[in-house]
Image (cartoon, rainbow, N blue to C red):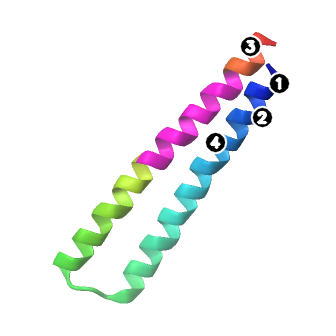
Amino acid sequence: MEMLVWAGAVVSLAGVIGLVWCILYVVKLRRAALDETAMRAKMHKAVLVNFAALAISTLGLMMVVAGIFLS
């Protein structure tokens, strides 16, 4: 079950990297001073990636917890 814990940690880390990417992307967008329509279109991408990153991170944490409980 140790492999499940480590695999979950890697998956969770991938989700956290996705969250950091979202933060940096939105900061870059805010500095670009785009018009509202362009900003909404680009923010839509950031929201989708943010939800996916949160789901991946949650899945990884569930794997870690399952690995700990099963060992």
Q: Which image quarter is the C terminus in?
A: top right
| Residue bearing mark 4 | 12
Which contiguous range is marked in magenta? Answer: 52-65
Task: Indicate which disc residue 2 carries.
Answer: 1
User: Secondary structure beneath disc 1?
Assistant: helix
Q: Mark 4 or mark 1, which is nearer to you?
A: 1
Marks 3 and 2, how far apart in space? Answer: 14 Å
Q: Mark 3 or mark 2, which is nearer to you?
A: 2
Instruction: Work out whether mark 3 precedes mark 4 in sequence or the reverse, and give the earlier one.
Output: 4
| Residue bearing mark 2 | 6
Above or below 41: residue 38: below
How many residues crowd mark 2 within 10 Å: few (<14), some (14–19), many (20+)? some
Looking at the image, residue 38 sits to the left or right of residue 53; the answer is left
Marks 3 and 4, how far apart in space? Answer: 17 Å
Instruction: Work out whether mark 1 precedes mark 3 in sequence or the reverse, and give the earlier one.
Output: 1
Marks 1 and 3, how far apart in space? Answer: 11 Å
Q: Which image quarter is the N terminus in?
A: top right
Instruction: Work out whether mark 3 precedes mark 2 in sequence or the reverse, and give the earlier one.
Output: 2
The amino acid marked with disc number 1 is: Glu
Q: Residue at x 83, y 24 (%)?
A: 2
Instruction: Work out whether mark 4 precedes mark 1 in sequence or the reverse, and give the earlier one.
Output: 1
The amino acid marked with disc number 2 is: Trp
Q: Mark 1 or mark 3, which is nearer to you?
A: 1
Task: Indicate which disc residue 69 carries.
Answer: 3
